[in-house]
Amino acid sequence: MKIMIVEDDPTIREMIQLALTKWSLETVIVDNFDHVVQCFIHNQPHLVIMDINLPSYDGFYWCQKIREISNVPVIFLSSRDSPMDVVMSVNMGGDDYIQKPFHMDVLTAKINALLRRTYSYSDMLSDVLEHEGVMFHPEKGILSYEGGKAELTKTEVSILKILMQQKGKVVDRKKIMRHLWQDESFVDENTLTVNIVRLRKKLAGIGKENWIVTKKGQGYMVP
């Protein structure tokens, strides 16, 4: 199991990391507090430990962003003692709230309990694809970049999914069409071209122009 620690106090961060390592839990340390969601998507943790008081944006903000793409358990840490913070942590999608200073045995017990409860039923990891800041949620058909969002059709979702899964490689037009036929979509050469044009317009609309590159005589790619 992988635990992501979002804590700007290095002493507390290292203390948590050491304790979790003793429990044979893998840890991911966030060191750039402007890219918490990107770190989450890249590492796909099973649980997040989130401090509330963070630089730039607070833990409530980042929990809300994570909740847009995943249901993994989130435990809030805070030195605040206001009941409103507990209420906020629940409203923002938190699963538990621990006030500082805390005993490490209490934190590890809560982590293990949440992991057992969550993953004994289902795997709740996000299926979000991310590349160059573009976040794509195939299940929801949502594409986002720097605050901009676009909704994709089923065919557009299928096309972008295969391109992002093969990022950096040219995907042959015929391969894309075969992939779409499996999804029971009627696609010929013209239909594929039209959908690529629409995808490019939607990407341009959220600030990503020329993101899908045409390789003449070969196919398309996301570089």
Image (cartoon, grey):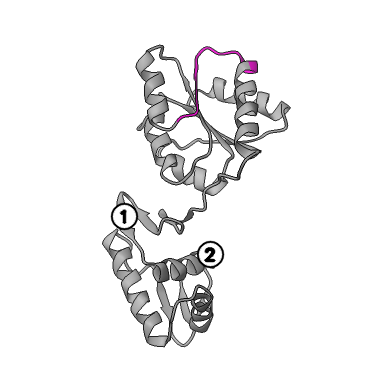
Q: Which residue is mark 2?
A: 165
Report x, y in % for residue 76.
48, 25
* 114 left or right of 39 in image: right
Q: Which residue is mark 1?
A: 149
Local secondary structure at mark 1: strand
Inspect the magenta stretch and tell me whether residue 65 lies in it.
no
Residue 25 in which image quadrant: top right
* 90 left or right of 13 in image: left
Local secondary structure at mark 2: helix
Amino acid on which disc 1 is placed:
Lys
Residue located at (45% from left, 77% from top): 185
**Image: 118 above or below 194:** above
In this view, the residue in front, 13 or 126, is 126
Magenta segment range? Answer: 94-105
Amino acid on which disc 2 is placed:
Gln
First in sequence, mark 2 or 1: give its number: 1
Residue 55 visible somewhere in the drawing: no
* 122 left or right of 9 in image: right
Report x, y in % for residue 107.
60, 20
Residue located at (46% from left, 88% from top): 217
